[in-house]
Amino acid sequence: MNDTTQRARHAGRATEAAGRAASRARPKAAHRRSGHWTAWAFLLPLVAYLVLFYAYPLYRNVELSLRDYNVRSFVHGGAPFAGLDNYAEVVRDATFWPALWHTAVFTLVSLVFQFFIGLGLAVFFNRHFKLSVVLRALFLVPWLLPLIVSASTWTLLLNSEAGAVNWLLGLGGIGPVDWLTSPHWSLASVTIANIWIGIPFNLVILYSGLQSVPDELYEAAALDGASAWQRFWRIAFPLLRPVSAITLMLGLVYTLKVFDLIWIMTRGGPADSSATFATWSYQLGFANPLPSFGPGAAVGNLLVLAALAFGLLYIRFERRQREAL
């Protein structure tokens, strides 16, 4: 009888313990569900933004490039499916290879000069001398100005007849240069303007990276007899690699899609001598009396693919950097 009573008591206690555990588990499960809904509530605006302003425009551009659109079908629909015909037409076009070359030269030269000039200025301002804050603020002006203002300013400076650049060249005994109207100089002109606009961005990012380098490393290297150049090359520059990588990646994506600067200064001319994929895409789709929406979208998609390829390379580089650490 006693054994039976004890078993009953133990069973009752076990039942009570299970009930208490279940009652504690229910609020935890409810709290987890509430946390999931809260997380989705915070994510929903971001997801909606990405779908509306990235996914749908990209889908629409791909759809445009795969159909034979004219003005009527663009408005009312019903464009026939063309497959990859628009891409084939773009590659066969006489403008394709010059535009590809101009895009590569414009992007590469801009990135190299923007990065190294910005790096030099970042090292210069990292010395913290008087008026360094004021001068850094002045260097940000080109970056803060609207691109239409910057492009118009450079158009005036490089004007063949009354531009300030040719006036300065004349003081040195050099004849006027047709910066914007000569096929030999138009690409160089828009590249110089783009370099000027992009230097402040590189300056800001690389200066922030230099600020994160501990002063103790410089002091220890100086005690070991390292020169200023050795301290930069052996300490600062290696530690700037992650910052340099993201700076170059962002600069690359931005430069690939530069349109308004070139269009305002040269409209891709003369004779397509400064045409890039960005300006050519716009010219095909919008700047002609009979626009070619499909080929224009195809050129735009080629730019997207180029940016995506470089983005994947950057991700691979970052992964290797983390594995090395």
Image (cartoon, rainbow, N blue to C red):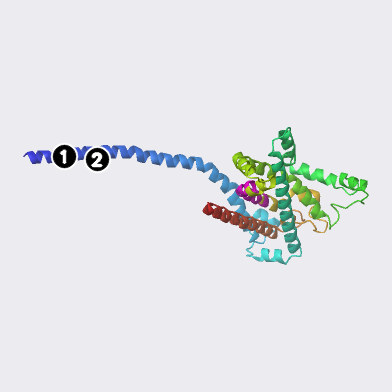
Query: Mark 1, residues whose alpha carbon is within 10 Å: few (<14), some, or many (≥20)?
Result: few
Q: Position of residue 201 (x, y in %)?
A: 69, 44
Task: Between label 2 and label 1, give the one nearer the viewer.
Answer: 1
The image quarter containing residue 18 is top left
Q: Is residue 64 above or below residue 133?
A: below
Give the left or right position of residue 93, taking residue 14 as reference.
right
Question: What residue do we see at 19% from left, 37% from top?
Answer: 13
Give the left or right position of residue 229, taking residue 58 as reference.
right
Q: Amino acid at mark 2?
A: Ala
Residue furthest out toward the left: 1
Assign the N terminus to one quadrant of the image: top left
Q: Amino acid at mark 1?
A: His
Residue corresponding to mark 2: 18
Does residue 249 show up magenta in the picture? yes
Under circle 1, the secondary element is helix
Q: Is residue 195 visible?
A: yes
Does residue 296 show up magenta in the picture? no
Residue corresponding to mark 1: 10
